[in-house]
Image (spheres, grey):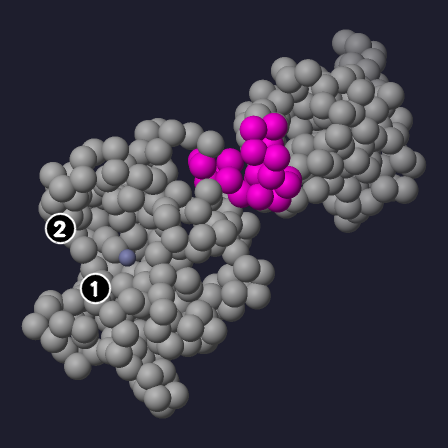
Amino acid sequence: MKKKKLHMKRGTLIVSKIIGVIAVLLLIFFIGYNITLDKFKSVGYSKDAAINIIKLTKINYAFDNPNNKTLDRAFSDTANYKEKNLDKYKNIKYVNHKDLISNINALLKKGYTVHDINLIISHGSNDDVKDFIKHDKIQYVEEFFDYPYAKIKNYDRYNNLMNDTGDDEETTICKVNMDVDKENYKDYVTVTDRSKYVLANKHHYLGPKYRPKLVKVSSKYLINPKEDVKGTNEAVSYAIKMIEAAKKDGLNLLINSGYRSFKDQQEVYDTYKNLYGEEYCLKYVMLPGFSEHQTGYSFDFGSGTNNIFKNSEEYKWLIRNSYKYGFIYRYLKSKEDITGVRAEAWHFRYVGVKASKVIDAEELSFEEYYAKYLDN
Ligand SMILES: [Zn+2]
């Protein structure tokens, strides 16, 4: 009896010793493991990546390439990680795309270089890239995608339009991004922007409910003082500043018209349609909802001394000076194929001084400015 008890005691002792040793070992391992994870964290690798880096025995590689988000994604994405592409992943600028690693693998397989892939993945969404992979390999990726605002989803349209028009790459990109290659008034974008950067044209539709907050223009600034001319507060106040500045230069610059509602534009359109027919109207008059006058940021100017505005000193003055007051000469002859509107000497658009200075310096249409700087 006594002997047995002693035996049991010894057995328990051994078991508890073993448990103790295991516990200590686990603790050491756990601490070591956590220190290692912390080390990986300090060089920009997530826990998932760190675990796989250890498994793949790429510890030195990871520490030699710290804070590389693309590598972090590659090591985390075990389903798509390919060791042979490791040096390629390293040199690809990270974008937050769901299928980044599998997309990179597919593009490499198609024969694209790291430089090409950087251009491709930075010019579209995850799905855009996936669609692009289905496309036959293109030879000169830089041709369009050296331009930061080019979109890979538009690649075929760029090619088609450039073949049709012979325009340069930059113009082509702007036109396609602004849907100029699509049929007028069809498949348009519905606009919700209420800011001074709002774009309204034959591919950007305001709709019947778009109505900005308006103020009246004092009658002393009007060609016809009895008319009711309105615009947004900011546009009106800058138009007045501009008119006063022209006055100081001895000129009589006046406003002919400003805001036009959807309904007003319908009436204008119907009137012209009755007079000249539909074909004429589609060419020269905006359909309701597509006119920039509905934004409250456009004015038609006139001269107090010359009935033909294009021949007036006021017109010449506006061309030279309007940008200083945030206005742009909206419909130029040289830009007819991108604005879709026949040249209009009298129509100026308020966009604010920041934009008007760039538009003036770079000789852009508002569509081109929009494609380059506003269309993200
Ligand atoms: Zn106008």
Q: Main secondary structure of the magenta part?
A: helix
**Residue located at (32% from left, 63% from top):** 346
Q: On the rendering, which quadrant does ligand 1 occupy?
A: bottom left
Please give the range of residues in magenta: 162-180
Amino acid type at circle 2 is Asp
Q: On the image, which quarter does residue 128 sit in? A: top right
Helix, strand or loop at disc 1?
A: strand
Mark carried by residue 341: none
Q: Label 1: how many residues lie within 10 Å, few (<14), some (14-19) or many (20+)? A: many
Q: On the image, which quarter does residue 59 sit in? A: top right
Q: Is residue 82 above or below residue 215?
A: above
Q: Is mark 1 within 8 Å of ligand 1?
A: yes
Helix, strand or loop at disc 2?
A: helix
Q: Which residue is mark 1?
A: 257
Amino acid type at circle 1 is Ser
Q: Is residue 341 above or below residue 118?
A: below
Q: Which residue is mark 2?
A: 264
Q: Furthest-left residue in view?
A: 226
Query: Is residue 19 among the parts visible in the rendering?
Result: no
